[in-house]
Image (spheres, rainbow, N blue to C red):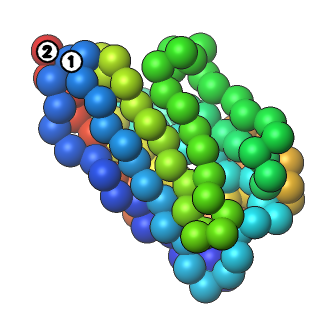
Amino acid sequence: QVQLVESGGGLVQAGGSLRLSCAASGRTISTYAMGWFRQAPGKERESVAAISCSSRNTYYADSVKGRFTISRDNANNRMYLQMNSLKPEDTAVYFCAVGPTCYAYPVPNVFDSWGQGTQVTVSS
């Protein structure tokens, strides 16, 4: 079973940038879809971005399209989320997750393994 650890969260001013990293261990992730999700207080967990096993396909939520970029480095068993032009509404705990196959529909209940989350706070 794969273990996932997110890092890179923090406090940033609106308009700033952060790069989140997800390190996988215990199992190679090269044949599995991966995704980023977030959950704000009192809100349901929502999809942010997802990427297929070979990076052939990507998905972005409308709210982050054009600002966030998902990528993965299969050789190093990592996934990243570059977050630019951050807005206060991006404030949430961000989770990385691994899907069961190379392609996975970008909804939380499709994904099998989850990290512990990293807090992103964007101040106005």
Name which residue lies at 62% across and 52% down. Answer: 72
Point out the image quarter for the C terminus: top left
Give the vertical position of 93 relative to 40 (above or below): below
- Please indicate, yes or no, whether residue 23 appears anywhere in the rendered image: yes
Q: Which mark is residue 124?
A: 2
List the residue tagged with mark 1: 14
Amino acid type at circle 1 is Ala
Going by the numbered disc 2, the residue's amino acid type is Ser
Look at 80% across and 52% down and name the residue there.
54
Locate the N terminus and report the quarter of the image it occupies. Answer: bottom right
Point out the tag, 1 or 2, that comes first from the N-terminus: 1
Q: Which mark is residue 82?
A: none
Residue 48: image quadrant is: top right
State the SS at label 2: loop
Q: Is residue 107 left or right of residue 78?
A: right
The image position of residue 56, as x and y in percent, is 82, 40
* Quadrant of res 101: bottom right
User: Is residue 108 shown left or right of residue 119?
Assistant: right
Q: Quadrant of residue 21?
A: bottom left
Neighbourhood count class around disc 2 (C-alpha, 10 Å): few under 14, some 14–19, many 20 upward: few
